[in-house]
Image (spheres, rainbow, N blue to C red):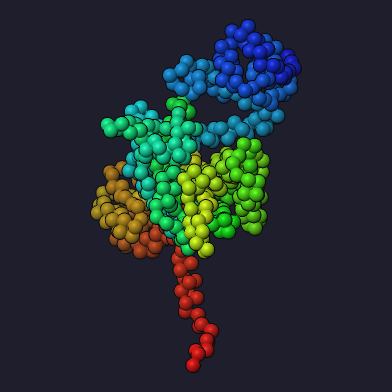
Amino acid sequence: MKALINQEYDVIKQRLPRDEALGIFRERGESYKQRLIEEMPDEQSLGLYFHQEYVDMCRGPHVPNTRFLKHFRLTKLSGAYWRGDARNAQLQRIYGTAWADRKALKSHLKRLEEAEKRDHRRLGRQLGLFHFQEEAPGAVFWHPDGWKVLQTLIAYMRHRQQNSGYVEVNTPDMMDRGLWETSGHWQNYQEHMFTTQTEDGRSLALKPMNCPGSVLLFRHGLKSYRDLPIRMGEFGKVHRYEPSGALHGLLRVRHFTQDDAHIYCTPEQMNDECRQVVALVLDIYREFGFEDVRLKLSTRPENRMGSEAVWDRLENALTASLETMGLDYQLNPGEGAFYGPKLEFVLRDAIGRDWQCGTLQVDMNLPERFGLDYVDEQGQRQRPVMLHRALFGSLERFLGILIEHHAGKLPAWLAPQQAVVMSITEPQADYANTLAETLCGAEIRAKADVRNEKIGYKIREQTLQRIPFLLIVGSREAAECKVTLRHRDGTDLGTLPVDEAIMLLAEHSRAPDIDAQRREQASRLERLRAPTPAVETPA
Ligand SMILES: [Zn+2]
């Protein structure tokens, strides 16, 4: 690397006609690049980068001269399967990174090191949350503690959705091929679908998306404008065949649960629904500690369905919701789906990495394909607008992101174990056990650690398990019905009477929305109690 950089040679980009590019790679005996070109039959010319003895095909950009690579580090060497598929040949891949100056390189390497420490696959093993194994590629084996976290996440979302006027539904995992033909998945997405043949000769597919099932639910029975908007949430498990080389812990799996929802509304309701979705998404991200959220809006692509007037309306619904809320967004012109524009929510985590999680899409394709309608005020049939919305996208992936964001120290309300009661010596074992039971009775996930080990050892071990609250009981605490409380970050919370300690833990173990809901309830009650203005009763 250093020798090449010191030569300071120019990297030259040339666009060459297809045949000429093919000829170059044929001459050089580079069969993979020839195959890549053959798989792009529509490209008439290709961008080639000439690096002295080496020729690369790339969209670019590349540095114009190797002198710009002075601050670099080669980070790893690995085998990668051609096309990410384990059935193909394995190729060597060399990873490296280069930066404008030494300082930027250093801070990048520091971030990599931090990311390595936070790797959710390592933490998942260490904290006993989940594992993967060869018998089920890309599928998670959830251990009790990991399952607890996932269920807590779902319970929280369920609660938030209930309070925002959603209903929850569930649709079948496996549905007939005909349905997927109508939705267009069979034609466009088949290579990613798991299919099966039943004995009576029917072709069925595991759902890669929840939308078609939701559409059938909406279409079941006549809908009136009075029923709208219908906000239908589903924690649907979806199945997508991903090449084995692309699988990556919880971040990329083949089977995952979406926090999906479909909103069916009239065109007049669309703007307000979009605004409400955006508000809900941002509020929930904030409760998870993600304050830095970027929004990206993808608008009408070249190939699209529907008239300009309809697109104006759909795009306007999204921009208007962002503008009334005073939110900045990045515009990606032409990047929308053929059936409608799309809003993406990108989270920035604790070490500055961006994760695209939530999406809000306005769709005119599925209502059209499935002939959805509702009866309007004049008794006429009208097409509803359909919004697709996911907050976390894949719950499995979001959990992976959360684990890395918090370096395994999940907020107390999400932690699988919230408290551990540790005895200092053997005689306090009963007291510790009873205290743990009392905590469980107060809906705090707690356990006792009464092993015959030194207290320092127990504290170290339970801290490594990221348990938020450590309760220590010795002979004095047992005699006075007290407990010494410590946080996993090392803060000493003092020695408290048991009931005070329980109150403190209960407060910190509640999901954030529960507090918000209590405040809301209190203010509603307040309004009920407020004296109503006197109304004159007609005689
Ligand atoms: Zn959908």
- Which of these two is toward me, 4 or 399? 399
How many marks can you see? 0
Residue 283: percent from the left, percent from the top? 54, 55
Instruction: Evaluate whether residue 367 shows in this view.
Output: yes
Residue 408: percent from the left, percent from the top? 45, 42
Q: Residue at x 35, y 33 (%)?
A: 203
Q: Quadrant of residue 4?
A: top right
Q: Quadrant of residue 44?
A: top right
Q: Quadrant of residue 437?
A: bottom left
| 234 displayed left or right of 323 | left
Residue 197: percent from the left, percent from the top? 32, 31
The answer to whether 538 is drawn above or below residue 143 in the figure is below
- Which of these two is toward me, 374 or 497? 374
Q: Residue at x 74, y 22 (%)?
A: 64
| 329 displayed left or right of 197 | right
State the quadrant of the N terminus. Answer: top right
Residue 447: percent from the left, percent from the top? 31, 50
Instruction: Evaluate whether residue 392 shows in this view.
Output: no
Identity of the residue furthest to the bottom in this view = 539
- Which of these two is toward me, 358 or 263? 263
| 338 displayed left or right of 45 | left
- Which of these two is toward me, 223 or 123? 223
Q: Residue at x 26, y 51 (%)?
A: 429
Q: Residue at x 53, y 35 (%)?
A: 115
